[in-house]
Structures are given as structure tokens and as C-alpha cells.
Image (cartoon, rainbow, N blue to C red):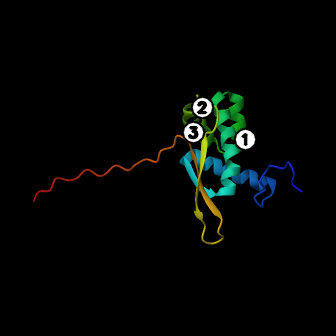
Amino acid sequence: MRHLKKTAKLGRTSEHRNAMLANLVCSLIIHKRVTTTLARAKAARSVAEKMVTLGKSGTQHDRRLAVARLHQEDAAKILFKEIAPVFKDRKGGYTRIVKMNQRIGDAAQKAILEWVDYAPAVPEAPAEAPSGQ
């Protein structure tokens, strides 16, 4: 029985799972939103929120811990310079999970993992050219 075992295994070994979650969180940091399965989004949410907590203090030790967990220095830089300052007054709950429809092939529940303050950029309408006629 799996009593008091809260880590979602996701059908992977621990090394593969940690690498997958690190890549998912790096994609979230770089692109501000990620579409994945619901189980992966729930597992990545805790990693992302812990990374923001590290980013809020911003010490050299926390930067090294973040790079060690994420394995991507550019994502860690974005985390410390852009994302963490936005959440400096917030106590927690930095991400949201929005459920989507099921995937066609295997009927897995899809979800969007995004930052709470993220607003999708609305593309500007192109300026209308004055018509000469």
C-alpha cells in the first residue's frame, strides 16, 4: 500500500522524473505557460513554487540551488530577474492549473500550467493603410 507516499511516480524512474519536471519548469519559466497532462502539471507545480521561493531571496546560495535543480542557467536567470520580483509580496500560490479537454490518443486529461499574474499578450491589430480610392 502507498500510505503517506505523496510523490507521483508518473511511470518513470526517479532520475527521469526529476529531469522531466526540471525541463517542464524551465519551459514554464521561459514561456510563461505550458500545456501538459494534469498529473504532470500537478507534479511540476510544487517544483515551480519552490523555485520561486528560492528566487525571492536571491542569495548566491539560492541561485546555485536553483541551477542545480533546473540544469539551465538561462532559465534560472529569468527566474531571478523577471519572475521572482513580481511575486515578492505574495506568500504562495504562484501558479495555476487550468483543466482542458482530454487528449485524443489516450484520453489523458490535459491542463495548462501558468503563472498567476500571466496575461496572454493580445496581438495588436495592424494599422489600417489609408485607401487611395
Determine which residue is flagged by label 3.
78
Hey, which quadrant is residue 39 in on the image? bottom right
Query: Residue at the location (57% across, 39% down)?
Result: 78
Query: Residue at the location (72% across, 30% down)?
Result: 61
Determine which residue is flagged by label 1.
68
Q: Nearer the viewer, mark 2 or mark 1?
A: 2
| Mark 1: amino acid | Ala
Left or right of 28, for residue 47: right
Gap in angstroms between the C-alphas marked 3 and 2 = 18 Å
Of residues 1 and 80, the one drawn nearer to the viewer in this rendering:
1
First in sequence: mark 1 vs mark 3: 1
Residue 6, horizontal then vertical, whole percent = 80, 49
| Mark 2: amino acid | Arg
CB atoms of marks 2 and 1 within 8 Å: no
Judged from the image, the secondary structure of the residue bearing numbered disc 1 is helix
Of residues 131 and 60, the one drawn nearer to the viewer in this rendering:
131
Gap in angstroms between the C-alphas marked 1 and 3 = 15 Å
Determine which residue is flagged by label 2.
90
Left or right of 78, for residue 19: right
- Badge 1 local density, few (<14 within 10 Å), some, or many (20+)? few
Residue 120, horizontal then vertical, whole percent = 46, 48
Hey, which quadrant is residue 105 in on the image? bottom right
